[in-house]
Amino acid sequence: MGSHFYGSGILKDADGIIFRSSTNVEDLPNFNGAGLYLSEPLLLAKIFDPKSGRNEIEAVIKRVWASVWNDRGFVERQIYGIVQEQVQAAVLVQPWFRSKVKRIDDSNFELSHYFYF
C-alpha cells in the first residue's frame, strides 16, 4: 500500500485509521453493550510493514471483528438472555485524529468519513 492511499483525500490530515466494533445487539432497551468489544487505532506509518510485507489493516479488522466473541461480551450477552446465534458484527473504519481524541467517545471525534465492513 503506497503513500497514495493516505497522501490525499479523507486521510490527508489523519494520524491513522481507527477500527471500531459494532453489533446488532447494542443499544437495546435492556442492554447497551458499551465497552464490551474492541476499538483499535492504527497509525498510518504502521499500515504496511516493509520487512514482512504484511498489511496490518487485515489483521486489525480480524481482531476487532472477532472481539465480539470475547469472553466478556459473550458472558454479558448470556446474562441478559441475548441469543448468541443472532449476534451480527460489523467493523466501522474511519480516519483517526490522535490530537483530537482523548477517549473513544470524545465529542471531538471526526465522524464525517466512515466505512462499514
Image: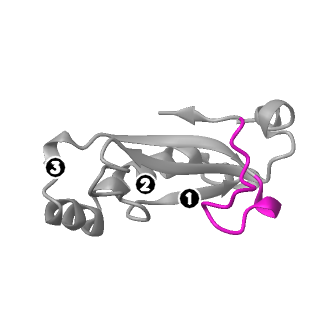
Question: Is 70 positioned to the left or the right of 40 in the image?
Answer: left
| Residue at 35% from the left image edge and 52% from the top image edge | 66
Residue at screen point 25% across, 68% down: 71
Q: Which residue is mark 1?
A: 40
Closer to the camera in the image, 112 or 3: 112
Cα separation, mark 3 vs mark 2, equals 19 Å
Of tags 1 and 2, which is closer to the observer? 1
What residue type is disc 2 on? Arg
Q: Give left or right: position of 5 versus 72.
A: right
Residue corresponding to mark 3: 84
Residues drawn in magenta:
97-112
Alpha-carbon span between mark 1 and mark 2: 9 Å
Circles 1 and 2, Cβ within 8 Å, touching? The answer is: yes
Q: Main secondary structure of the magenta part?
A: loop
Q: CA distance from mark 3 to mark 1?
A: 24 Å
Residue type, numbered disc 1? Glu
- Amino acid at circle 3: Gln
Asked whether 18 or 7 is in front, the reply is 18
| Dot placed on the residue nearer the N-terminal end, 3 or 1 | 1
* Earlier sequence position, callout 1 versus callout 2: 1
Give the percent coordinates (x, y) of residue 110.
73, 47
Q: Nearer the viewer, mark 3 or mark 1?
A: 3
Q: Is residue 79 magenta?
A: no
Is-magenta flag for residue 105? yes
Residue 78: tell me if it is visible.
Answer: yes
Q: Please give the name of the residue rendered at 77% of the width and 54% of the height, measured from the top-left corner.
A: 97
The image's mark for residue 63 is: 2
